[in-house]
Each structure stands twice: as structure tokens, then as C-alpha cells.
Amino acid sequence: MKLIVQIPCLNEEKTLAQTVKDIPRTIDGIDKIEILVIDDGSTDQTVKIAEELNVDYIVRFRHNKGLAKAFTAGLDASVQYGADIIVNTDADNQYKGEDIPNLIKPIMEGKAEIVVGDRQVDSIPHFSFIKKILQKFGSWVVRQISETSVTDTTSGFRAYSKDAALMLNIVSPFTYTLESIIQAGKKHMTIVHVPIRTNKPLRKSRLFKSIPSYIRRSVVTIVRMYAMFQPLRIFFCFGAIFLLVGSLGIFRFLYLYVVSSGAAGHIQSLILSGVSLMMGFMLLMIGLVADIISFNRRLIEDVLYRVRKMELVFSSESVKISAVTGKKGDSRLTTSRSESEHFQH
């Protein structure tokens, strides 16, 4: 069984060495442990340090594309390099590498497809009271939407089985943490959480500039994901509100028409009620169309999953043929998810 630890990086020349150093080199039940660094367009010496550390693989973006893209490219490359289990960790050495055996244990035992490290936010001293409250509330919201039990939904310390990595399709340009959990829940993957420890912060988080900005972008991600998987429910709720308001307006007009023996002075409310009914009907129709699109999306994702598995089989067969003929394969891989360069050391 092969484990690849992937580390998304953006200008991490000061912390990458410590992060790599903390990753265990032997784990019971794991035959091979390799390290993959994803350089998200760094302008410092991150790549040079990664090369000096002799990490096994480096994926390079020519320009910064964001954490979500780097994470997705890492999953894609890890699977192509033959990983059975993939661990994602942050390059700022926030998480303790010695907790990796506990993180991957549920996957090795066949009890989970995705494992999220629970930082136990209450015990982190450098987290402010407001940040702890927001973390808890945000995790609760994601749990309700995804129908999972993950207690720390923003934790980046995670383990994925090969099948889980093939099934995930991250579309958010911001971050993968929330979206991947919602996707896993809606796709009925088995996702669990285990307690982990954290190190003292070596630098401030660069994922967001301010708490309001982080909240806004997280809310957009959550709403988008929920709308992708449950469009009919969302549009039905809004449509039902407009239909109810319109119906009440019609009944009000009819009542006043009978009581007042005329429609004088009530035409405006009748027009507004009619507009409300039309909007409600349109929202219901949009919900039906969106639901059909969502169903087609699930079919496309299923086809994409099967194609990726076939690509892996074809790739492994090519490696076997190369080994028999004595020809060396090109160490560069072309990823279908993003434009990047892959280097094998």
C-alpha cells in the first residue's frame, strides 16, 4: 500500500523544511511513503528548497491559481503516481506529522473513505474567541447541509482513499475544505473525523484577508454547493413563498371586492399579487430545470470517475510494458484537471 503526502505551497520557503521533516517515513501497514509538493506559483525559494529536501514529486503552477486548484492538482497527480491513500497537510507546519498514522487508520481498516483531522478548536490557544465561535457555527452549518458528522470542517489535515480522490470534483476557486465535505456527504461517501494536535503558528494565515471576507466567501461556497446538489428544494422554497404571498393578495382582493361592492382602490394589490404568482411559478419551473441539470451532472461525474479509473489501468499497463521492454517512461505527467508541470525526483 502506497501513501503520498501532498503539501500545497505558496511562498513557504521558511516553513516547508520543518513540515517535510515532521512527516513519518515508516508506518505499519504502509509499504511506501512519498511526498508531493504543489507549488502554487511561488515567487520565493519554495521550489528550490523542495528540491534540496529531495521530495519525491513537485507539481508547479506558472501562476498562482489558489488553494482549491493546488489541492485538486495534488489529488490528480497523487492518484497518477499510484497512491492508495493521500494525505493533505498545510505547508505552514500547523499540523503534527506524527498524527498521520492515526489519520489514515480508518481508511486502512476499510471504515472510511475520507478522514478529517479534528483540531478540537476549543483547545487551540492562539484562536480568538470570535474565531472559535465562527468555526463551530460554520462547522454546524456544513454538517446540516452535508449530513455528515465532521466537527472541524475547515481543517486541512485530511486523508483520502484513491476512490474518494477520483470521485471529488472541486469547482470552488476559494478553498476545498467546505466543498469537499459537502460533496462527500451528497455522494454518500463514508467520512469520519479523528482528533489531531496542532503546532504553534509559524506565521499568520494567508487564506483570507479578514474575517468578514472569509465569512462572505464561505457562505457563497456553501450556498453554491447546496444549490448544485439540492436545486429543486431551494427554488421550491423561494417559489412557494412568492406563490403564498400572491395567493394571499388575491384572496384579500376578492374579500375586499365583495365587502366593498367594487374593486376601486384595490387594483394595485391585484397586480402585485399577479406578479408574485408569476414569479413563484417561474421559480418552480427553474427549480425543475435545475434539478434535471443536477441529475445530468451526476451522470457526467459518474462517467468521469469511470474514465479516470480506466486511465489509471492504462497507465499502469504502460508502465509494465515499459519495464518489460526496458524503456524508461517520461517522468512528466499531463493532468486533465489543470495546467501544471509535474516533476519526479
Image: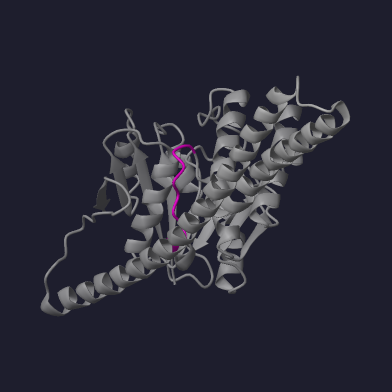
Expressed as whole percent of the image width and height from the top left, the position of residue 42 reads 34, 32
Q: Which residue is the extreme one toward the top?
A: 265
Residue 95 vertical placement versus 43 (above, below): below
Say whether residue 241 is magenta.
no
Q: Quadrant of residue 63?
A: top left
In the displayed structure image, the side of residue 269 where residue 88 appears, left or right: left
Q: Residue furthest right?
A: 259
Q: Can the viewer see residue 142 in this picture?
A: yes
Q: Is residue 251 positioned above or below 147 on the image?
A: above
Q: Determine whether 104 is above or below 335 in the image.
A: below
Residue at x 12% of width, y 74% of height: 326
Give the residue displayed 37% in from the left and 58% down from the top: 78
Pick the residue in front: 154 or 157. 154
Q: How many marks?
A: 0
Picture coordinates of residue 295 (x, y %)?
Answer: 48, 61
Residue 58 left/right relative to 30: left
Q: Which residues are magenta?
A: 165-174
93 or 183, which is in the foreground?
A: 183
Which quadrant holds the C terminus?
A: bottom left
